Image: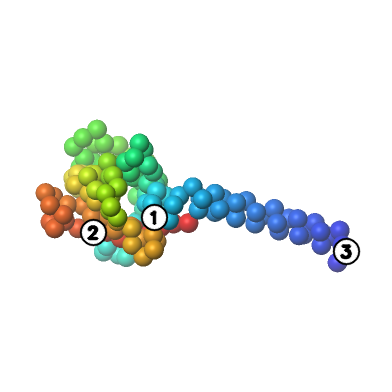
């Protein structure tokens, strides 16, 4: 192989790797490891299969989570027909389901979470686990002991 071809191959390889590495570095630099801001994968409790990707962002000091992508086959066009607020009959993909969580110590509390399967809105709290690779999201009625926790997995 000639030197020109080797140089060209190396340049193509570097050009292909560099953007991905740069994007990863940018994301790592902009989101502290102790923050839930980022992309999270939910897992269906019954099937243990990936269910959706949730994008959490910080809006004015409060966390907001939106369903970025539904991962269940043939469910991408589902609507929230059980919702009773302004989300009624709106597409679930793209819907905000988590809002109002504010940092309090090592947890984020005081928010709400929508279960688009039944249209119910619950009080919510969340905390990071497993070195920031998991987000324990708890939806509850009244007090946190009366509720359910889901583990969301951080996506890179």
Disc 3 marks which residue?
Answer: 2
Residue 5 picture location, percent across and down:
83, 60
Q: Point out the residue furthest to the right here.
A: 2
Kindly identify which residue carries mark 1.
34
Q: Position of residue 113 (x, y in %)?
A: 24, 46
Q: Please, is residue 61 above or below residue 148 in the view? A: above
The one nearer the camera, 14 or 59, is: 59
At x 24% / y 44%, what residue is drawn?
111
Q: In 3D space, how far apart are the residues under numbered discs 3 and 1 (Cα atoms)?
A: 49 Å
- Determine the CA span between mark 2 and mark 3: 59 Å
Q: Residue at x 39, y 60 (%)?
A: 132
76 left or right, relative to 17: left
Residue in view at x 80 percent, y 56 percent: 8
Are the residues at dot 2 and dot 1 in contact (C-beta closer than 8 Å)? no
* Location of residue 127 by image quarter: bottom left
Q: Is residue 37 left or right of residue 90?
A: right
Secondary element type, mark 2? strand
Please identify, in this view, whether the residue under mark 2 or under mark 1 is nearer the observer: 1
Disc on the earlier residue, 2 or 1: 1
The answer to whether any part of residue 59 appears in the image is yes
Q: Which residue is found at the position 26% from the left and 64% from the top?
A: 46
Question: Residue at label 2?
Answer: 149
Q: Position of residue 152 (x, y in %)?
A: 34, 58
């Amino acid at each position: 192989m000639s030197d020109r071809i080797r140089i060209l191959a190396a340049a193509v390889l570097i050009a292909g790797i560099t953007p991905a590495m740069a994007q990863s570095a940018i994301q790592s630099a902009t989101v502290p490891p102790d923050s839930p801001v980022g992309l999270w994968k939910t897992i269906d409790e019954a099937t243990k299969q990936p269910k959706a990707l949730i994008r959490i962002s910080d809006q004015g000091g409060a966390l907001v989570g939106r369903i970025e992508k539904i991962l269940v086959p043939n469910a991408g066009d589902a609507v929230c027909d059980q919702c009773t607020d302004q989300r009624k009959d709106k597409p679930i993909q793209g819907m905000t389901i988590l809002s109002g969580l504010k940092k309090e110590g090592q947890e984020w509390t005081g928010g709400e979470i929508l279960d688009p399967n039944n249209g119910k809105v619950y009080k919510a709290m969340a905390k990071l686990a497993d070195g920031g690779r998991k987000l324990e999201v708890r939806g509850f009625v009244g007090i946190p002991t009366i509720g359910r926790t889901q583990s969301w997995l951080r996506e890179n």
